Image (cartoon, helix red, strand yellow):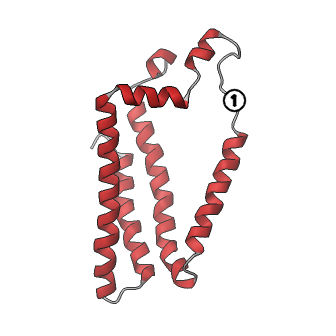
Amino acid sequence: YLRRSGLSTQEFKQIEGNSRAYSLFGRVLCFAVIGYLMEWKLSLPYWLTAVSAAVSVGILAGLPEWSHAPGSAAAEKARPSLAEAFLQAIRSRWLVLLMLQGVVLFVLARVISVNLFQPILASKNFGVGAYGVVMGAMTLVEAVGAARPQW
């Protein structure tokens, strides 16, 4: 898509890494606070997540329409389609394998961090707040890695 649009493909890796890092830095702050919020009121993080999702939907609704000239053949051909995206994914065995690998690694990382670190911290008499700080520190390392994809 970048090549077809005449955009730079060389900078994509760094731009994508920076975007991911910004997202993760925000998550670091949330993780550091979330544990203490859970100590105060256990369900509060879930309510904050629901509010955040609603705000995201509001932002999505305010985004402008597709930027190609309306009605042009190029606009219709380039228009993103969820159904076409699924068809492309199904047609490519490598893409499906890569997506599954990503999901598996994500789930394993989260299961390990929750099922391993939380009991260890609990056995050392750390509260839920400390668990949020540990998760924040782990995410900080991930954010630095995302910001420097050339490493």
Report the front residue among 149 and 129: 129
> In this rendering, does residue 83 appear at all?
yes
User: Taking 58 as reference, is 90 left or right?
Assistant: left
The front one of 86 and 53 is 86
Q: Is residue 118 above or below residue 145?
A: below
Q: Quadrant of residue 110?
A: bottom left
Image position, residue 48 (x, y; %): 61, 67
Residue 127, horizontal then vertical, whole percent:
41, 85
Q: Residue at x 57, y 15 (%)?
A: 77
Could you tell me which residue is drawn at 56 percent across and 27 percent down?
81
Residue beneath the point at 35% across and 70% down: 114
Amino acid type, mark 1: Glu
x and y, in percent, of residue 139 in the image: 38, 61
Residue at the top extreme of this rendering: 73
Label 1 secondary element: loop
Residue at 43% over, 73% down: 132
Residue 30 or 110: which is nearer the viewer?
Answer: 110
- Examine the rendered structure and indicate whether residue 44 appears above or below residue 123: above
Q: Is residue 48 left or right of residue 18?
A: right
For residue 64, what is the image quadrant? top right
- Count of residue discs: 1
Residue for badge 1:
65
Say left or right for 72 vs 130: right
Please state the horizontal and vertical placement of residue 97, each as a whole percent of the image. Answer: 29, 37
Q: Residues within 10 Å of mark 1 (few under 14, many from 20)?
A: few
Image quarter where the C terminus lies is top left
Considering only vertical position in the picture, is 22 above or below 84? below
Residue 11 appears in the rendering: no
